[in-house]
Image: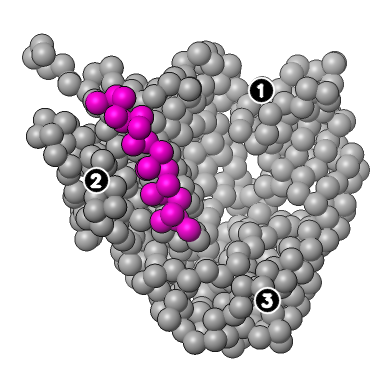
């Protein structure tokens, strides 16, 4: 091998991602790391030389899904002796060496705290011809310093923190991601400014408990200050954040949202249950009155804000009266949508060993009632927008172009999904362009806007248009994938 040439040069990769937005962003980093090491995205339909599983340990049957997918690769790997399989993410952090016991054909296992080690571990496993397991118990370097390959020219994730200090009895994330670690605001803003310089219009601030940002600095108003600072970044048109915790949702954050023009009127705030008794059992440090008070405060300052939530049905000990309290909050909050989950026992969580586990058939019956109510209210809320003109950022990946109507899809400022119809008198919008369109029909989970009123072409749209679709999919990347080498950035003071 010639001097200075990596042995990974030209080898192909595929990254398979499961779980939350944090995992999606981690996969962008894994993809960036692999490409920086000389790997290239595997063409669609072809077997990759390296397959990376970025796993989740929160969802039901996460273990079964992983090991099922790993078993499907056994005959493929037998036919391709040089193929390597790596497993990372939360399930790897939890199971560690157990993964090799159950799936000895895996080559690399790495945890949530050392994703930057992947290229080295792959090379070491290949040279030594033996599996490599490296699990760090604490974060050594904030992962935003790693190269990132983004999926979009117009939208990007920006991590403000990693880890979580909460002790919710249903959640294993703090044990796998560690305690909360916050970035310096100057580093965050430097990353945002670099992204905007590349054409990004929209950023989403990301953290396991995003509005607790500043806890390491002893500044409980740090998150509100960060939102206001984002408002001063020239060219940044949309700012979102996920996911906040009601405990840390303070008046200064609400004021910052309302007073910062590029912070979007949308809020995803997990509720989990409307019952005070169940919230206490979950170790959620708020109660129904506090939660609804936040909703009222947000609507008082941002009447048109779209609010979404997470709800767990059938938590241990949940009675019909407890469930009715959840239904009551859904009616009062008028959610624009909700991610609803049937409780499932997750090994390693306190809730898994609690008495009074609710029978599966009872959970299912309540779940059906809940999603019917959520759908009814979301539909009613969407219908209020019929006849209104909304600003939509045309997106890639929100749904394919409708062949019959030629609709394109995107997100309104309040994050509602909008399908936009064409106007022969206006340019055809591209992903990354911003349009003004009138809502002509409301469905429970989307809006149709068949009166296209204006199209604003953006630099992000120009960039996406110039990238050839033949450049290949792969990982979380795609035709509009963009590389960002963050170590080259200079942090702001």
Check the image and report above or below for 124 versus 166.
above
Element under disc 1: loop
Q: Which residue is mark 1?
A: 430
Q: Residue at x 29, y 59 (%)?
A: 95
**Crowdedness near tag 3: few (<14), some (14–19) or many (≥20) residues, C-alpha within 10 Å:** few
Residue 120 seen in the figure: no
Q: Are marks 3 and 2 in contact (CB under 8 Å)?
A: no
Assess whether residue 70 is covered by the magenta stretch: yes
Query: If you read the primary sequence from the N terminus, does the residue marked by circle 3 or circle 2 appear first?
Result: 2
Q: Residue at x 16, y 31 (%)?
A: 126
**Distance from label 1 to label 2 (Cα)?**
46 Å
Secondary element at tag 2: loop
Residue located at (41% from left, 38% from top): 72
Q: Is residue 279 magenta?
A: no
In three-dimensional space, the C-alpha distance between marks 3 and 2, rounded to whole angstroms, equals 39 Å
User: 247 and 469: which one is in front?
Assistant: 469
**What is the span of residues highlighted in magenta in the rendered image?**
61-81
Camera-nearest residue between 455 and 283: 283
Indicate which disc residue 104 carries. 2
Q: What residue is shown with label 3? A: 362
């Amino acid at each position: 091998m010639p001097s200075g040439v990596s042995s990974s040069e030209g080898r192909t990769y595929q990254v398979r991602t499961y779980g939350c937005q944090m995992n999606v962003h981690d996969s962008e980093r894994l993809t960036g790391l692999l490409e920086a090491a000389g790997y290239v995205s595997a063409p669609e339909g072809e077997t990759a030389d390296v397959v990376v599983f970025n796993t989740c340990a929160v969802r039901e049957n996460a273990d079964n899904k992983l090991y099922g997918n790993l078993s499907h690769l056994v005959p493929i790997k037998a036919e391709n002796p040089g193929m390597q399989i790596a497993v990372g993410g939360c399930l790897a952090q939890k199971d560690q060496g157990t993964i090799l016991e159950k799936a000895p054909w895996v080559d690399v296992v790495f945890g949530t705290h050392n994703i930057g080690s992947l290229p080295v571990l792959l090379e070491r496993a290949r040279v030594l011809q033996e599996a490599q397991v490296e699990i760090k118990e604490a974060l050594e370097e904030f992962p935003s310093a790693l190269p990132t390959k983004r999926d979009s020219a117009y939208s990007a994730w920006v991590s403000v923190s990693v880890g979580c200090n909460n002790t919710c009895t249903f959640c294993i994330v703090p044990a796998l991601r560690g305690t909360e670690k916050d970035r310096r605001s100057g580093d965050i803003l430097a990353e945002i400014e670099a992204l905007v310089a590349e054409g990004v219009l929209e950023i989403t601030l990301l953290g396991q408990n995003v509005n607790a940002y500043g806890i390491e600095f002893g500044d409980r108003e740090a998150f509100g200050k960060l939102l206001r600072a984002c408002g001063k970044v020239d060219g940044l048109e949309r700012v979102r954040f996920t996911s906040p915790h009601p405990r840390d949702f303070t008046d200064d954050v609400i004021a910052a949202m309302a007073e910062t023009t590029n912070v979007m009127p949308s809020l995803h705030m997990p509720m989990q249950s409307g019952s005070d008794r169940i919230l206490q059992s979950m170790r959620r440090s708020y109660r129904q009155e506090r939660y609804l008070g936040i909703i009222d405060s947000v609507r008082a300052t941002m009447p048109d804000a779209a609010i979404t939530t997470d709800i767990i049905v059938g938590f241990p000990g949940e009675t019909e009266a407890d469930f009715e309290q959840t239904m009551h909050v859904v009616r009062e909050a008028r959610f624009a949508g909700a991610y609803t989950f049937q409780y499932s026992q997750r090994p390693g969580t306190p809730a898994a060993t609690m008495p009074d586990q609710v029978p599966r058939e009872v959970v299912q019956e309540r779940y059906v009632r809940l999603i019917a109510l959520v759908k009814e209210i979301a539909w009613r809320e969407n219908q209020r927008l019929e006849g209104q003109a909304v600003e939509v950022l045309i997106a890639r990946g929100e749904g394919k172009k409708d062949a019959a109507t030629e609709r394109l899809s995107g997100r309104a400022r309040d994050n509602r999904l909008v399908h936009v119809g064409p106007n022969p008198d206006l340019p055809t919008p591209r992903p990354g362009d911003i349009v003004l369109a009138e809502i002509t029909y409301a469905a429970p989970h989307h809006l149709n806007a068949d009166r296209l009123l204006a199209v604003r072409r953006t630099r992000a749209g120009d960039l996406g248009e110039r990238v050839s679709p033949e450049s290949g999919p792969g990982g979380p990347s795609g035709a509009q994938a963009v590389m960002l080498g963050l170590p080259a950035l200079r942090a702001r003071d």
